[in-house]
Amino acid sequence: MHVVEDLYYNLRDGVPDSLSAYCGLTALVANLEECYSVILSDMFSDCREDIRTIDADRVILLKYDLFNYLDLNGDGRLTQYFNDHSISDPDEMAEIIAYGLWLHLNSEKCELEDVNKFRLSMEGKTQDYPKSLNECFQSLSIRLSDEELEQFRQTNEKDIIGFFHFGLGSYIRSNFGLFCGVAPLTKFFIEKELFHPDDMSTIILYGFWLYLNSKPCDYESVSQFYAGLRTLT
């Protein structure tokens, strides 16, 4: 298991008691090094290895699980550590811990300064990815020929996934950063509780079909449209 979305879904199964215990323990740790030790202390070795071998650009996805378990909104010592370094956003704290944990497992420097440098280097790799659904639709409109656009537009909405999941859908997943945890669009989808690239590309495909058919294609409209189709199957 070396894919973050599977690890995300299975972390709780792999460490049923350890992560849930961190809420109390993080009130006691005073820095990142102590935090890594606490997180790894009860974690199964195979789960450690799964985290260690994740591709660097997908490490950020771990922060969503860490954020749910670590008490970073309170006044514990770890939160105070971040505050002392002018970091007050719990989401940013969880992101730093995720990157730092990965660096720690890979025997890299993982002090706060080192982690922040690494974060900045990863963010620089996402500039060419679409930053919104509308940018996705515009990019696809340029990439596809007029014939391909018309074929997609005329496809029955019930057949979109069956016909395009492994063709156009594969292109979307690979070229729009859906396998990259630091890509803007991936972050957007995760905030909407969509964690798997397949689910993300499904929304983009349906949204693009709505876009070409001059229908509302914002995220909420696409989600409602997709939900409506699912009730018919």
Image (spheres, rainbow, N blue to C red):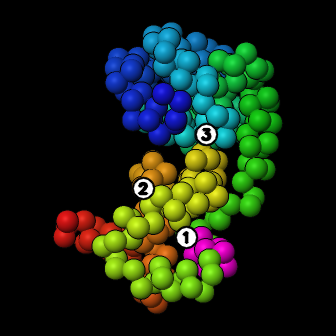
Identify the residue under disc 2: 199
Secondary element under disc 3, as helix, strand or loop, is helix
Q: Is residue 39 visible?
A: no
Magenta region: which residues? 136-143
Identify the residue under disc 3: 58
- Horizontal side, residue 81 vs residue 1: left or right: right
Above or below, 47 relative to 147: above
Callout 3 environment at 10 Å: few (<14), some (14 to 19), or many (20+)? Answer: some
Q: CA distance from mark 3 to mark 1?
A: 20 Å
Q: Is residue 46 visible?
A: yes
Identify the disc placed on residue 133.
1
Quadrant in the picture for residue 176: bottom right
Give the mark, 2 or 1, whose residue is nearer the N terminus. 1
Quadrant in the picture for residue 95: top right
Residue 33 screen position, x and y as percent:
66, 16
Quadrant in the picture for residue 186: bottom right
For image coordinates 37% across by 27% down, the residue present is: 12
